Amino acid sequence: MPDPVIEGYAIVSEDGMLADAAGVMPQGLVFEADQRFFERGLGAADLVVHGRHSREQQARSAERRRLILTRRGPGLEQTSSEPQVFAWNPAALAFEDALEAFTAPVTRVGVIGGTDVFGLFLDRYDVFYLTRAPGVRLPGGRPVFPEVPALTPEEVLARHGMVAREREVLDAGKGVEVVAWRRE
Ligand SMILES: NC(=O)c1ccc[n+]([C@@H]2O[C@H](COP(=O)([O-])OP(=O)(O)OC[C@H]3O[C@@H](n4cnc5c(N)ncnc54)[C@H](OP(=O)(O)O)[C@@H]3O)[C@@H](O)[C@H]2O)c1
């Protein structure tokens, strides 16, 4: 099976957080234009990858194939067959081997967090869509990558061979922008 395209999606506060200190994503990080961008992106994916606390809530969510990360279990356990959903322990089974469990080929993967899931794929993203929520700070919150806040999210992406390419204004009035970071 050829390697799938791997895309990451995150919206972060000015200090690089994806949720507050209690692990809750506050309303300050929710923007309709970003939600639409995110929904469009996942609409083109044929597999969604996320941690146990990060499922997206979109009209087509119930139809999506998933790998849900866990540190428990033997490697891969199917929890639904239609669509195929697996609990995946990456310490026990490689990503490529987990993909083999899907009956139809996986061609485009959407990685949607949280922190350690985004961190796990840092050397593998083809593109990471990083949206900034202007004017929001979440000190002590859950960072987008494990290295934040020692480094900014942009520094982390750059250290992993990614380059800022297209910038798209999602909501000019609210100053919400997404930058597509692509592998150099
Ligand atoms: N702003 C954004 O773009 C964005 C994106 C994603 C999430 N969020 C928000 O962030 C909060 C949750 O973040 P989170 O980081 O706590 O949650 P998370 O990654 O969704 O879930 C954490 C759980 O997932 C499993 N897990 C995560 N990384 C793993 C790894 N590398 N290897 C194996 N298992 C792994 C573990 O499950 P076990 O306990 O089963 O071992 C862990 O307890 C939520 O409020 C969510 O809405 C925001």
Image (spheres, grey):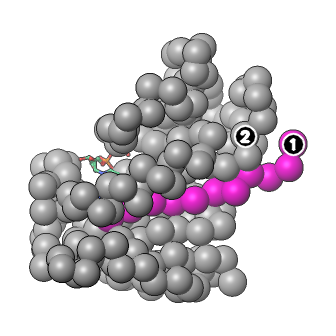
Magenta residue check for 10: yes
Q: Nearer the viewer, residue 100 or 159?
A: 100
Rendered-image quarter of ligand 1:
top left
Is there any visible trace of residue 153 in the rendered image? no
Q: Is residue 3 above or below residue 83?
A: below
Prevailing SS of the magenta stretch: strand
Q: Which residue is mark 2?
A: 106
Q: Which residues are magenta?
A: 1-11
> Is 172 situated above or below 44?
below
- Residue at the disc numbered 1: 1
Label 2 Cα neighbours within 10 Å, binned few <14 / some 14-19 / many ≥20: some
Looking at marks 2 and 1 on the same chain, the residue that comes earlier in the sequence is marked by 1
Vertical comparison of 71 with 107: above or below: above
The spot of residue 44 in percent (x, y) is: 59, 49
Against 167, is 83 above or below?
Answer: above
Which kind of residue does numbered mark 2 sit on?
Answer: Val
Quadrant containing the C terminus in the rendered view: bottom right
- Tell me which amino acid carries mark 1: Met
Please give the label number shown on residue 55.
none
Secondary element under disc 1, as helix, strand or loop, is loop
Looking at the image, residue 98 sits to the left or right of residue 83; the answer is right
Q: Find residue 93 and report its image quarter.
A: top right
* 94 relative position to 10: left or right: right
Q: Are marks 2 and 1 in contact (CB under 8 Å)?
A: yes
Residue at left offset 52%, top offset 16%:
79
**x and y percent of residue 92 in the render?**
63, 34
Does the segment drawn in magenta span residue 168? no
